[in-house]
């Protein structure tokens, strides 16, 4: 609050294609800024594609802006939430050093240049951190904001089933008191476009098993959030320890990695998949990244996806050159 006081405007930057945790955390930081008398805008690269996330934004009534490099310079202060400088998943130009960084991903060295940083990698969600700030500032969030924070924590931790800490559980308990259950229900069961079902069909149709790994190339996808959702879904397969889903959106090959092996490091595997041209990172159980595609051709895209798949299989120790077996097929159906 000391840092914010005395400035007029704050720009909160989220990761590209922001998830519920990022959106809720940014909205909470806006609340803090407003309490300090600072006007606040929230911006991001990419888009808000997933039905749940669009419903969340609608209920919050926040106006999310596309992030433009020149626009960012018009603000007195810049904050990053749920991401960090140089993480590769946000569009804040590298030459801009943010004033504030609040995140729960592993600490990055560039973050130390920020005036104020609070990075707690034990936490399951950035929303849990921001909830503590609101409590300390004596700010009671509105029902929509409480609902958003609750949903942000629940979705980032998969209802505390994924890496999380006591603070996340405590925040969930406290936020349930303030949240609107109807709103929560609408967000969880947000409406989706027909593209959603097409992408899901592609994901299942193209999924291949390699030992205890499942890989699915979704091809061209309408929305970058789809890869995370499908990687989560495929991990539910009883024989999968690792999943990778890939898909091309606007000249970028996006990918998501998941693991349920206790010692797995999806974040490190994501870095290896990204290679030198891409960017990857995340958490031990869930990671992701993107690789720029130099050509728009289907052939080129498929080759890049296959190369990324090989890097993934090598990184998780699945060293065979087999082409894998289809996860679903008519033949499987006849056999069972
Ligand atoms: Mn998060």
Image: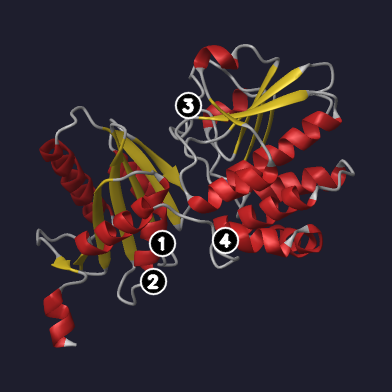
Q: Earlier in the sequence, mark 1 or mark 4?
A: 4
Q: Is residue 238 visible?
A: yes
Mark 2 crowdedness (10 Å alpha carbons): few <14, some 14-19, many ≥20: few
From the top left corner, tell me how far across and down residue 235 is, in percent.
37, 67
The residue tagged 1 is 232
From the top left corner, tell me how far across and down residue 236 is, in percent.
38, 71
Q: Which residue is nearer to you in this view: 318 or 334?
A: 334
What whole-number distance in Å separates the C-alpha atoms at marks 3 and 2?
A: 32 Å
Circles 3 and 2 in contact, beta carbons < 8 Å: no
Mark in the foreground, 1 or 4: 4
In the picture, the disc for residue 236 is 2
Q: Earlier in the sequence, mark 4 or mark 2?
A: 4
Q: Earlier in the sequence, mark 3 or mark 1?
A: 3
In the picture, the disc for residue 188 is 4
Q: Residue at x 66, y 60 (%)?
A: 184
Q: Which residue is nearer to you in this view: 187 or 24?
A: 187
Q: Quadrant of residue 208?
A: bottom left
Q: Earlier in the sequence, mark 4 or mark 3?
A: 3
Q: How is the image coloured?
A: secondary structure
The residue tagged 3 is 91
| Quadrant of the image containing the C terminus | bottom left
Circles 2 and 1 in contact, beta carbons < 8 Å: yes
Q: Name above or below for residue 228 compared with residue 25.
A: below
From the top left corner, tell me how far across and down residue 98 is, in percent.
62, 23
């Amino acid at each position: 609050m000391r840092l914010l006081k005395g400035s007029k405007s704050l720009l909160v930057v989220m990761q590209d294609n922001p998830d519920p945790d990022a959106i809720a955390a940014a909205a909470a930081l806006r609340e803090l800024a407003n309490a300090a008398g600072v006007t606040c805008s929230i911006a991001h690269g990419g888009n808000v594609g997933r039905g749940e996330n669009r419903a969340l934004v609608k209920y919050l009534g926040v106006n999310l802006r596309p992030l433009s490099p020149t626009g960012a310079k018009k603000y007195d202060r810049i904050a990053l939430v749920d991401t960090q400088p140089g993480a590769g998943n946000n569009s804040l130009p590298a030459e801009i050093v943010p004033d504030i960084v609040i995140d729960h991903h592993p600490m990055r060295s560039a973050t130390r240049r920020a005036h104020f940083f609070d990075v707690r990698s034990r936490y399951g969600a950035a929303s849990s951190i921001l909830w503590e700030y609101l409590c300390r500032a004596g700010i009671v969030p509105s029902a929509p904001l409480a609902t958003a924070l609750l949903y942000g924590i629940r979705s980032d931790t998969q209802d505390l089933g994924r890496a999380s800490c006591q603070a996340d559980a405590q925040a969930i308990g406290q936020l349930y008191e303030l949240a609107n259950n109807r709103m929560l229900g609408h967000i969880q069961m947000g409406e989706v476009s027909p593209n959603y079902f097409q992408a899901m069909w592609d994901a299942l149709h193209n999924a291949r098993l390699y030992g205890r790994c499942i890989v699915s190339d979704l091809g061209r996808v309408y929305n970058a959030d789809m890869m995370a959702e499908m990687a989560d879904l495929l991990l539910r397969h009883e024989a999968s320890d690792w999943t990778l889903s890939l898909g091309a959106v606007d000249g970028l090959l996006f990918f998501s990695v998941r693991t349920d092996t206790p010692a797995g490091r999806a974040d490190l595997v994501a870095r290896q998949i990204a290679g030198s041209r891409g960017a990857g990172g995340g958490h031990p159980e869930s990671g992701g990244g993107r690789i720029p595609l130099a050509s728009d051709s289907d052939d080129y895209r498929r080759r890049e996806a296959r190369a990324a798949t090989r890097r993934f299989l090598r990184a998780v120790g699945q060293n065979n050159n087999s082409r894998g077996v289809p996860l679903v097929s008519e033949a499987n159906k006849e056999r069972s």
